[in-house]
Amino acid sequence: MIRPATPDDLPTICRLIRALAEYERLSHAVVFDEFHVREHLFGPRPFAEVLLAEDDGIVVGFALFFHNYSTFVGKPGLYLEDLFVEPEFRGRGHGKALLIAVARLAVERGCGRMEWSVLNWNEPAIQFYRSLGAIAMDEWSVYRLTGGGLRHVADMDGD
């Protein structure tokens, strides 16, 4: 079963984010504050949404996504930030059900596309996405500003 998350699900969402980070070998990068996650997901101006996958009433996976915009397509899109199913529940269709649910929302909302990133070493995920017809955007590279680098650019004079 796939369902939208509620504020009561916040501890579960945070647990799943930490489990995803562990799987991706990025636990050291998890620095979020649960108060801010609650505000960003369920506050007056949500920045992202979460769908949860349940197996026998137990939450076993999640998809976190948000809207973006394609100037070339001239339509909004959905960016899938995280898709994760706990290892012991993989192979039961939960990941596919989550991806389908997000894709359906994208279509219902008139989005022109749905995008996400995957770590280059995560071959099981790459094969899964390819099996659904997704294509890698190999000609694009992801760039990121965080922390001090982000603040430095924000403080620059525009000249």
Image (cartoon, rainbow, N blue to C red):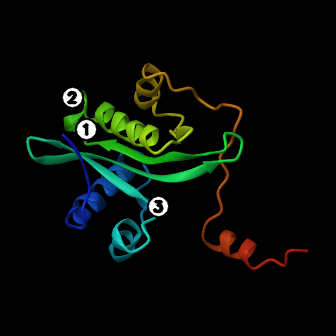
What residue lies at 42% left-to-right and 31% top-to-bottom? 125
Q: From the image, tell me which residue sits under label 3.
A: 29
Q: At numbered mark 3, what does the secondary structure look like: helix, strand or loop? A: helix
Dividing the picture into quadrants, the one containing residue 87 is: top left
* Residue 26 horizontal side relative to residue 20, left or right: right
Picture layout, residue 128 above or below residue 32: above
Tell me which amino acid carries mark 3: Ala
* Residue 155 horizontal side relative to residue 110, left or right: right
Which residue lies most toward the right here?
159
Residue situated in front as seen by the camera: 35 or 20:
35
Tell me which amino acid carries mark 1: Pro
First in sequence, mark 2 or 1: give its number.
Answer: 1
Q: CA distance from mark 2 to mark 1?
A: 11 Å
Front label number (2 vs 1)? 2
Q: CA distance from mark 3 to mark 2?
A: 29 Å
Q: From the image, tell me which residue sits under label 1.
A: 87
Q: From the image, tell me which residue sits under label 2.
A: 92
Q: At numbered mark 1, what does the secondary structure look like: helix, strand or loop? A: helix
Q: Whole-percent x and y of residue 60?
A: 21, 45
